Amino acid sequence: MRARAFTLAGLVCGLTLLPPLFAQDAPTPVRLIIKPLLCVIDKDATSCAVTFDIRWKSQLPGEFCLNDSVQATPLRCWPRSLAGEMTQERVFAEDFRYWLSLPAAGLSLPAAGLSLPAADSPAAGGERLSEVKIEVLRVGSNDRRRERRTRHVWDVL
């Protein structure tokens, strides 16, 4: 009887510990990597000029389009691809986003000379598969207290 209780307790403890060993987060199907993510500008500057390094990778081949929150049309589309990369020079003053999505209905893929029929692709404004936010950080202040020179602790004169 006592051996049976220890066996049952060991079985319950073992079953409690097993799920964390097998439970893993599902990897994201599409990963978008953009560098740099932040543009730091002076308080007097009006805009930021950056060359973005854009790369993406997918676990399954497909047709993917790179979009941004500034333009209504995709920046570039890749037909039947597992990965893609490009660089883009841009001048901007406000935060914006890049994202990967499936091509919109009836979208023409100029890089390959293909066009997608409306029945084969999702409606315009399809699901964002991966998204990255680009931020603008302004440094400096109009506060005079921050601009004046402060004395060092050891400076007596």
Image (cartoon, grey):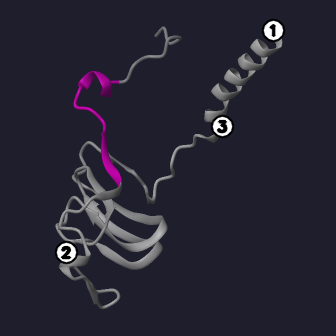
Determine whether, in the image, residue 72 is placed left or right of residue 132.
left
For marks 2 and 1, the one nearer the N-term is 1
- Residue 2 — which label? 1
Q: Which residues are magenta?
A: 131-148
- Residue located at (20% from left, 71% from top): 73
What residue is pinned by disc 2? 105
Q: In front: mark 3 or mark 1?
A: 1
Residue 16 picture quarter? top right
Near mark 2 (Cα within 10 A), the count class, few <14, some 14-19 or many ≥20, is: some
Q: Quick one: SS at disc 3?
A: helix
Distance of label 3 from label 2 (alpha carbons): 43 Å
What residue is pinned by disc 3? 21
- Residue 25 — which label? none
Q: CB atoms at circles 2 and 1 under 8 Å apart? A: no
Find out whether residue 8 is within the magenta segment: no
Distance of label 3 from label 1 (alpha carbons): 29 Å
Q: Position of residue 156 (x, y in %)?
A: 48, 8
Determine whether, in the image, residue 51 is placed left or right of residue 124.
right
Asked whether 31 or 29 is in front, the reply is 29
Find out whether residue 139 is within the magenta segment: yes
For marks 3 and 2, the one nearer the N-term is 3
Q: Amino acid at mark 3?
A: Leu
